[in-house]
Amino acid sequence: MKLIKYGLYVLALYVVLSRPTLYRFHEGLIHIPPKHINAFISTPQHARIHGIDVSHYQGDIDFEKVEGTGLGFVYVKATEGITYVDPRYHENVKKLNNTKLLTGAYHFFQPDDDVIQQADNFIKQINNSKHVLPPMLDVEVSNGLNVKEMKARVKQWLNYVSGKLNCRPLLYSNGDFWKQYLGNGFDKYSFWLADYAKKPNLPAGLKKWRVWQYENTGYVNGIDGYVDHDVIIKGALDCHEQ
């Protein structure tokens, strides 16, 4: 028993003394994606196009350190509903403009709010932000609306923003929500799938799977705490993909 206690003391002392070294090692890490995603990536070039999506939940981000990990893009939450603006959005954009990271912005959709007011809230905030990636609509809740109402409102937002920005947005959701509320009526929009599994549950009939959010508990240098990790599966993120 004494030997066990002694061994535990030595181990504890080692952990305490080695913490700065371990921390520095973590700080210098280059982002290496998990191997299981490679089976779903169309080309080696896409395997290198990894990114993250962030909001105020990630706190104060050092985007120069993020850039140093080898990540290629960052999507930033801009707005939600008809009045909400993410409190870190403009600060995040200002910092990102000092890096070479490709950037895009997204809106969290509240289905029971006025659709055009939501879209105008988003457009107003991103107009001067110099994003080069298409806007993204995050659709995860129905707020009691039925399928017909959901489809009509999501299409209204997408069509309105596409016309105002001359850029076709991406559509983000998980597979189950897609199957229940969206479906093939959105085939012209590239889909960003949220699925934290080694083998994603792709909705039947999905034609334009472009981005996979494969992890929501990832780490990256420059951010304290968890962050979503994403990879471009196929094609390019451009405004008018056919």
Image (tube, rainbow, N blue to C red):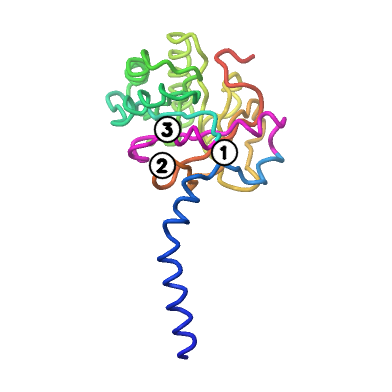
Front tag of 2 and 1: 2
Q: Which of disc 1 and disc 2 is earlier in sequence?
A: 1
Q: Which of disc 3 and disc 2 is earlier in sequence?
A: 3
Q: Residue at position x 43%, y 19% from top?
A: 157
Front tag of 1 and 3: 3
**Front-most of residues 11 and 134:** 11
Q: Tag 3's secondary structure?
A: helix
The three-letter amino acid code for the residue at tag 2 is Ile
Q: Which mark is residue 63?
A: 3
**Front-most of residues 189 and 45:** 45
Decide whether residue 169 is among the magenta residues: no
Question: Residue 102 at what x, y percent from top left?
Answer: 50, 23
Q: Which mark is residue 223?
A: 2
Q: Which mark is residue 175?
A: 1
Q: CA distance from mark 2 to mark 1?
A: 28 Å
Question: Residue 85 at what x, y percent from top left?
Answer: 30, 27
Q: Residue at position x 42%, y 15% from top?
A: 130
Where residue 77 sits, quadrant-wise, is top left
Which stretch appears magenta?
A: 40-69
Image marks 2 and 3: residues in contact by CB distance under 8 Å: no
Q: Tag 1's secondary structure?
A: helix
Q: CA distance from mark 1 to mark 3?
A: 30 Å
Image marks 1 and 3: residues in contact by CB distance under 8 Å: no
